[in-house]
Amino acid sequence: MQKPLYRTSLYLFLYGGNQGAGYPLNDGSKRESRMEATSQEVPSEAATSIFKSPRRMLVRFFRKSQQKWKKKAMERRAKIKSLEHKVRDIDGSRACWKSKVQQLEADKRALEERARVAEAERAQLQAKIEELETKKT
């Protein structure tokens, strides 16, 4: 099983390797650039100690930093997932309401047509009533 990248990076940072290329060392010299750093030679203690703090303190700091980062990333993922669910639910709700509105609009048009027909019939009947009344007198 392969070690996680953060453990490998932390190990290389604390115990040597070609990490941190390009940063100044304690003696004022420059490390070789990343492109030139192809060999896996272990630098001396002076070359690896760019920090003045003890390694145990650095390890504790980096672990806490990593845990905070992971926690924040997990919270963000959970928030994204909940928002995706909310969007999905809202889209479903919107589609449901849209179909209800379309159905109600169709019903409204049908009722308006029936009202027009009924009004036309009423007008015809009213005309017949008036005609019959005029004949009667």
Image: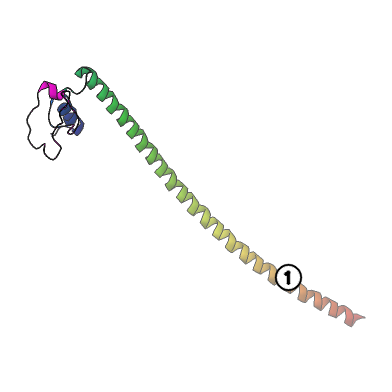
Q: Which residues are magenta?
A: 19-48
Main secondary structure type of the part rendered in magenta: loop
Q: Secondary structure at mark 1?
A: helix
Q: Is residue 97 above or below residue 70?
A: below
Crowd rating for badge 1 (residues with CA inside 10 Å; few <14, some 14–19, many 20+): few
Give percent across and percent down for residue 81.
Answer: 37, 41
Residue highlighted by disc 1: 119
Quadrant hosting residue 105: bottom right
Name the image quarter holding the N terminus.
top left
Give percent across and percent down for residue 17.
Answer: 12, 30
For the point 33% across and 34% down, which residue is it?
Answer: 73
For the point 76% across and 76% down, which residue is it?
Answer: 124
Residue nearest the viewer, comparing 127 with 36: 36
Give percent across and percent down for residue 21.
Answer: 17, 33
Kind of residue indicated by mark 1: Glu
Residue nearest the viewer, comparing 91 with 76: 76
Residue nearest the viewer, comparing 79 with 53: 53
Q: Is residue 56 above or below residue 31?
A: above
| Residue found at the far right of this picture | 137
Magenta residue check for 32? yes
Name the image quarter holding the C terminus.
bottom right
Give percent across and percent down for residue 14.
Answer: 17, 24
Relative horizontal placement of residue 14, taking residue 98 as reference (left or right): left
The image's colouring method is rainbow
For the point 36% across and 36% down, which residue is it?
Answer: 76
Q: Is residue 82 above or below residue 72?
A: below
